[in-house]
Protein backbone atom coordinates (compact mmCIF):
# COMPACT_ATOMS: atom_id res chain seq x y z
CA UNK A 1 0.00 0.00 0.00
CA UNK A 2 1.15 3.51 -0.78
CA UNK A 3 2.28 5.81 1.98
CA UNK A 4 1.65 9.18 0.32
CA UNK A 5 -1.04 11.13 -1.47
CA UNK A 6 0.07 14.25 -3.31
CA UNK A 7 -2.37 16.70 -4.87
CA UNK A 8 -1.01 19.28 -7.28
CA UNK A 9 -2.41 22.27 -9.12
CA UNK A 10 -0.03 23.69 -11.71
CA UNK A 11 -0.38 27.32 -12.70
CA UNK A 12 1.92 27.83 -15.67
CA UNK A 13 2.68 31.25 -17.03
CA UNK A 14 2.34 31.28 -20.79
CA UNK A 15 4.78 33.09 -23.09
CA UNK A 16 2.20 35.39 -24.74
CA UNK A 17 -0.67 35.17 -22.24
CA UNK A 18 -2.33 32.45 -24.29
CA UNK A 19 -4.59 29.77 -22.81
CA UNK A 20 -2.79 27.73 -20.14
CA UNK A 21 -4.89 24.57 -20.63
CA UNK A 22 -2.48 22.98 -23.18
CA UNK A 23 0.28 23.38 -20.57
CA UNK A 24 -1.89 21.81 -17.87
CA UNK A 25 -2.66 18.98 -20.30
CA UNK A 26 1.08 18.46 -20.79
CA UNK A 27 1.59 18.29 -17.01
CA UNK A 28 -1.12 15.63 -16.76
CA UNK A 29 0.56 13.68 -19.59
CA UNK A 30 3.71 13.55 -17.46
CA UNK A 31 1.67 12.06 -14.61
CA UNK A 32 0.07 9.54 -16.97
CA UNK A 33 3.46 8.48 -18.34
CA UNK A 34 4.89 8.07 -14.84
CA UNK A 35 2.78 5.02 -14.09
CA UNK A 36 1.63 6.26 -10.67
CA UNK A 37 -1.99 5.93 -9.66
CA UNK A 38 -3.78 9.25 -10.12
CA UNK A 39 -7.16 10.97 -10.40
CA UNK A 40 -7.75 14.20 -12.31
CA UNK A 41 -10.19 16.60 -10.63
CA UNK A 42 -11.42 20.00 -11.82
CA UNK A 43 -8.91 22.05 -9.82
CA UNK A 44 -6.09 19.60 -9.07
CA UNK A 45 -4.78 16.11 -9.70
CA UNK A 46 -4.13 13.64 -6.88
CA UNK A 47 -1.41 11.01 -7.12
CA UNK A 48 -0.81 7.99 -4.91
CA UNK A 49 2.58 6.41 -4.27
CA UNK A 50 5.79 6.90 -2.34
CA UNK A 51 6.89 10.43 -1.46
CA UNK A 52 10.19 10.34 -3.37
CA UNK A 53 8.49 8.94 -6.47
CA UNK A 54 5.73 11.58 -6.40
CA UNK A 55 8.18 14.44 -5.91
CA UNK A 56 10.10 13.16 -8.93
CA UNK A 57 6.89 13.32 -10.97
CA UNK A 58 6.43 16.94 -9.84
CA UNK A 59 9.99 17.74 -10.92
CA UNK A 60 9.35 16.10 -14.29
CA UNK A 61 6.15 18.11 -14.69
CA UNK A 62 8.01 21.38 -14.17
CA UNK A 63 10.75 20.32 -16.58
CA UNK A 64 8.19 19.43 -19.25
CA UNK A 65 6.38 22.75 -18.87
CA UNK A 66 9.61 24.73 -19.19
CA UNK A 67 10.49 22.67 -22.28
CA UNK A 68 7.01 23.46 -23.66
CA UNK A 69 7.77 27.17 -23.37
CA UNK A 70 6.36 28.20 -20.00
CA UNK A 71 8.65 30.90 -18.55
CA UNK A 72 7.57 30.08 -14.98
CA UNK A 73 5.31 27.73 -13.06
CA UNK A 74 3.62 27.96 -9.70
CA UNK A 75 2.49 24.67 -8.19
CA UNK A 76 0.26 24.35 -5.18
CA UNK A 77 0.90 21.01 -3.52
CA UNK A 78 -0.80 19.15 -0.68
CA UNK A 79 0.85 16.06 0.76
CA UNK A 80 -0.74 13.48 3.04
CA UNK A 81 1.76 10.93 4.34
CA UNK A 82 0.96 7.97 6.55
CA UNK A 83 3.63 5.35 7.37
CA UNK A 84 0.82 2.81 7.93
CA UNK A 85 -0.49 3.34 4.40
CA UNK A 86 -2.95 5.65 2.71
CA UNK A 87 -5.14 5.49 -0.38
CA UNK A 88 -7.55 7.68 -2.28
CA UNK A 89 -10.19 4.96 -2.06
CA UNK A 90 -9.94 4.60 1.70
CA UNK A 91 -10.25 8.34 2.26
CA UNK A 92 -13.21 8.78 -0.09
CA UNK A 93 -15.04 5.43 -0.04
CA UNK A 94 -18.06 6.73 1.90
CA UNK A 95 -18.62 9.40 -0.78
CA UNK A 96 -18.42 7.10 -3.79
CA UNK A 97 -21.60 5.66 -5.32
Image: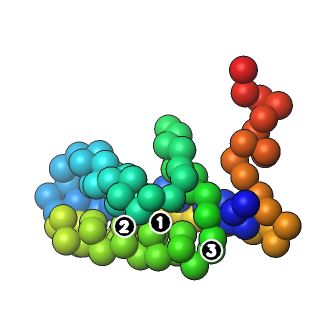
Category of crowding for the residue at label 1, using alpha-carbon neighbours closer than 10 angstroms: few (below 14), some (14–19), many (at least 20): some
Which callout, 3 or 2, points at the residue further toward the start of the chain? 3
- The answer to which of 39 and 11 lies nearer the viewer is 39
What x and y, as percent, mark residue 93? 78, 35
Residue 94 percent coordinates (x, y)? 82, 31
The residue sitting at the front extreme is 1
Q: Which residue is mark 2?
A: 61
Q: Residue at x 19, y 71 (%)?
A: 67
Q: Which quadrant of the figure has residue 69?
A: bottom left
The residue carrying pointer 2 sits among few (fewer than 14), some (14 to 19) or many (20 or more) residues within 10 Å by Cα, namely many
Which of 8/60 is in front?
60
Q: Is any part of residue 20 visible from this angle?
A: no
Residue in the image at 23% along x and 60% along y: 14
User: Any mark on residue 75, and which?
Assistant: 1
Is 9 situated left or right of 63 in this image? right
Q: Split into 4 quadrants, where in the image is the C terminus?
A: top right
Expressed as whole percent of the image width and height from the top left, the position of residue 92 reads 76, 39
Image marks 2 and 1: residues in contact by CB distance under 8 Å: yes
Q: Are marks 3 and 2 in contact (CB under 8 Å)?
A: no
According to the image, label 3 marks what residue? 51
Eye-nearest disc, 3 or 1: 3
Amino acid sequence: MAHTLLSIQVIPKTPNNENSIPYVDRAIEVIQQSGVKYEVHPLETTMEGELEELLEVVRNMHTALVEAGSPSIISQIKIAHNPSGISMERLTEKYRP
